[in-house]
Image (cartoon, coloured by chain):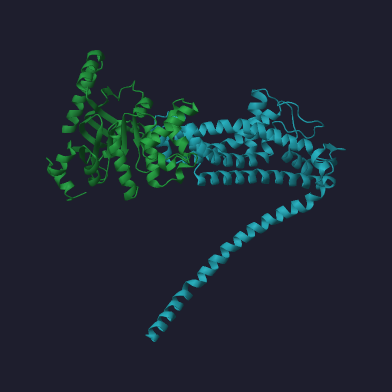
Amino acid sequence: MKTEVLNRGIVFEKKKSEWRGYELVGFWALRSTLVLVLFILGVIVFDIVSKGAGVINWEFLTQPPRVGMTEGGIFPAIVGTFYVTVITIAFAVPLGVGAAIYLNEYAVQGKFTRLVRMSVRNLAGVPSIVFGLFGMAVFVKIFGFGPSLIAAGFTLGLLTLPVTVTASEEALRTVPKAYREGSFALGATRWQVVRTVVLPRAIPGIMTGTILGLARAAGETAPILATGAAFFLPHLPDSVTSQFMALPYHLFIMSTQHHAISQVRPIAYGTALVLLALVCILNLAAVLLRKKYRDRVAKGL
Amino acid sequence: MMQTKSNVTLEETRVQENPKPEPDKLKKNIENEYCEVKVENLNFFYGSVQALFNVTIKVQEKGVAALIGPSGCGKSTFLRVLNRMNDLIPKTRLEGKVSIHGENIYTPDTDVVNLRKKVSMVFQHPNPFPKSIFDNIAYGPRIDGLKDKTVLSEIVETSLKGAALWDEVKDRLNEPALALSGGQQQRLCIARALAVKPRILLMDEPTSAIDPIATQKIEDLIRDLCTNYTIIIVTHNMQQAARISDHTGFFLQGEMVEWGKTSSLFTNPEDQRTEDYITGRFG
């Protein structure tokens, strides 16, 4: 008996030693890639925070730039980014969600819907500068908005549309078929099914997807470059047809276009930090929303 | 070959019927005076696959009709023909005539939404909406435009009583329906169907996902309900069909092999295939 147990132990040890080495190599190789990614991210964040935190104060956040943008704050850029994001939401959310509902709930699934889906996904890969030029040609020139909040907001809206449509469709698709059938079987019309059963269930997914799309749009420079962002404005935009300052564009100016780049470098870092914080807040909002609705789903309401 | 021939005749009769609907309708009404569900020469297709062959059946008002047969024999498909739930599946096609209470339900003018209120359905897996118990029952009346809170409360109470669930949930109507047990959820779904005041209740294996004690409760409920409603139930369980139904239909490979009084079908089947199935020789 004893020898048998012993022998078995030895056999196991031999087998283990055969694969153990490969396993360790794989484990450490993969783990080190993760460490590397986190390290790079950490360096970037540390760089921005350490160099930008010093200039952040109440004045920086609430005052316009002064003395040829070498002093003062970035208030108009914060407000401009806020306004343009609101217009982006107003444009992209109804359009994107509506299109997704049609595609997923109404359209007869076939070659055509597959083609539409493929096109929408490909649209997500179009470089943002192309959207910018398109926006300039269509909204600024043909529609005659001129360089303005609305032209830039619509352009950013177009940029986020693929994300909004795709995320909304994913969210709609995860609503169990049983809910739809249950509703139809009680004599609901298609729109009633969508409104009372499908949408309430899909809204968290739609919202998180949309917010993530917006977070990307809020940080874009190229699409607003030619559609309404201004180098410098002494006052805040007073209508949707006004030009505006925006954080990403301001950052671009401060780091490459300013006449005294080295002097305004801290302001550039401060702007980058504010932009980063803004995007983080948006993403955090998405995470919290998702959690809130997940809890609700877990409770069954 | 036989199949194709009968389809052609069917198409021909339909063409002949259409130009003069008046006398035809009259005739239909007389014919169907006491017939709740009447299906004639029904053929049903998923794309190019035929799922039902030449099914003819008459179901009388009130009582329980059970449809039995092995998996994939078409009994669920048949059930979903009766409230046009198959419309939701793309590329389905139907030939033949299906009348509910004397009215052809497959005309271009048929109000499908109204039909489904009259012919409601309970599914295999309990599917309460992720809403409160109250909101689940009130769902049907609400989509019908009813807003009055007192009327809604009355409907909720009668429906829950009708489904023998009221005593168990009357103190927690605002709690989520998904917190109920599986058997309770299924009775909730029955109550939800009752709230739209249907004539006919279709049940697609309503107890197959539920434990035996809850199953018994639902079977008792079905027996109670059948004094007021026509119930057509699909079941895998032959004993269940024998216990609760007045009439039974046996489906095999898309054909209705036999249809008759439950007592005679189970004791004295006419068709050899029915006998083989109910004695457990296959299935």
Residue B47 showing in the rendered view: no
Location of residue A125 by image quarter: top right
Foreground residue among B225 and A238 = B225
Q: Residue at x 27, y 38 (%)?
A: B223
| Rendered image quadrant of residue A238 | top right
Q: Nearer the viewer, residue B157 or A223?
A: B157
Give the image quarter of residue A74: top right
What shade does chain A have? cyan
Quadrant (top left/top right/bottom left/bottom right) for the N terminus of chain A: bottom left
Q: Nearer the viewer, residue B163 or B13?
A: B163
* Place of residue B93 in the rendered image (x, y in percent of width and height, measured from the top left): 30, 31
Horizontal and vertical percent position of residue A117: 49, 37
Q: Answer left or right for B231 relative to A179.
A: left
Residue under the image location 42 percent in, 40 percent down? B128
Residue A8: x percent and y percent? Answer: 40, 80
Residue B162, given in percent of the width and then of the height, sits at: 36, 35
Say if B104 sits above or below A1 in the image: above
**Residue B163 shows in the view:** yes
Q: Is residue B128 left or right of residue A87?
A: left
Tally of numbered discs: 0
Q: Is residue A248 shown left or right of residue B34?
A: right
In the rendered structure, the colour chosen for chain B is green
